[in-house]
Image (cartoon, grey):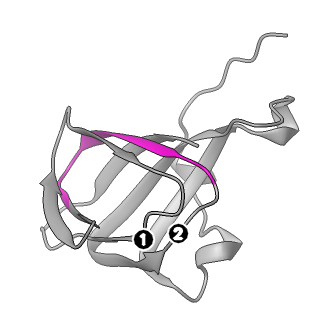
């Protein structure tokens, strides 16, 4: 099977899991169960200026690659500012949070 998708900002929406645990966060899925991927998901996330994602954990690994803007990822109690062309790996069960203290949105690609 093959699947081709494009990023369209109009498709961004707040994931239901983060509706009450984030501010200014939106995501669009490119690959997930709907595309036939049972154990993999890929998407584009946007965190608005002044936005945040509260502490949370996943039962899966997460890889992020920042495309534009800057955001702070707090992982293992350490804040790390990520910018364009930076990437991060978040292991299974690792508590983490995001914030965007900048003046522009931060956009990243995630692989779950």
Q: Position of residue 44 (x, y in %)?
A: 50, 44
Q: Residue at x 76, y 37 (%)?
A: 39
SS for callout 2: loop
Left-right relation of 68 to 64: left
Q: Residue at x 83, y 36 (%)?
A: 38
Alpha carbon of mark 1 to alpha carbon of mark 2: how far? 5 Å
| Nearest the eye: 70 or 72 | 72
Q: In this picture, is 1 found above or below 54?
A: above
| Nearest the eye: 12 or 17 | 17
Q: Alpha-carbon neighbours of circle 2 within 10 Å: few (<14), some, or many (≥20)?
A: some
* Quadrant in the picture for residue 36: top right
- Looking at the rendered image, the quarter that the C terminus falls into is top right
Q: Position of residue 33 (x, y in %)?
A: 84, 40
Left-right relation of 5 to 78: right
Q: Position of residue 95 (x, y in %)?
A: 42, 71
Q: Which mark is residue 57?
A: 2
| Nearest the eye: 86 or 93 | 93
Membership of 61 in magenta stretch: yes
* Quadrant in the picture for residue 24: bottom left
Start-end of magenta stretch: 60-71
Q: In this picture, is 44 found above or below 95?
A: above
Q: Residue at x 65, y 44 (%)?
A: 29
Q: Overall secondary structure of the magenta stretch? A: strand
> Are discs 1 and 2 less than 8 Å apart at CB?
yes
Q: Alpha-carbon neighbours of circle 1 within 10 Å: few (<14), some, or many (≥20)?
A: some
What residue is disc 1 on?
Answer: 95
Q: How many marks?
A: 2
């Amino acid at each position: 099977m093959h699947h081709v998708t494009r990023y369209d900002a109009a498709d961004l929406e707040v994931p239901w899991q983060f509706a009450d645990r984030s501010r200014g966060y939106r995501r669009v899925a490119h690959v997930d169960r709907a595309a036939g991927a049972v154990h993999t998901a890929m998407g584009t996330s946007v965190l608005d200026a002044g936005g945040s994602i509260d502490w949370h954990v996943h039962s899966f690994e997460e890889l992020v690659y920042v495309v534009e803007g800057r955001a702070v990822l707090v992982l293992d109690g350490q804040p790390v500012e990520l910018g364009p062309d930076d990437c991060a790996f978040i292991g299974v069960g690792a508590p983490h949070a995001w914030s965007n203290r900048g003046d522009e949105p931060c956009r990243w690609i995630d692989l779950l």
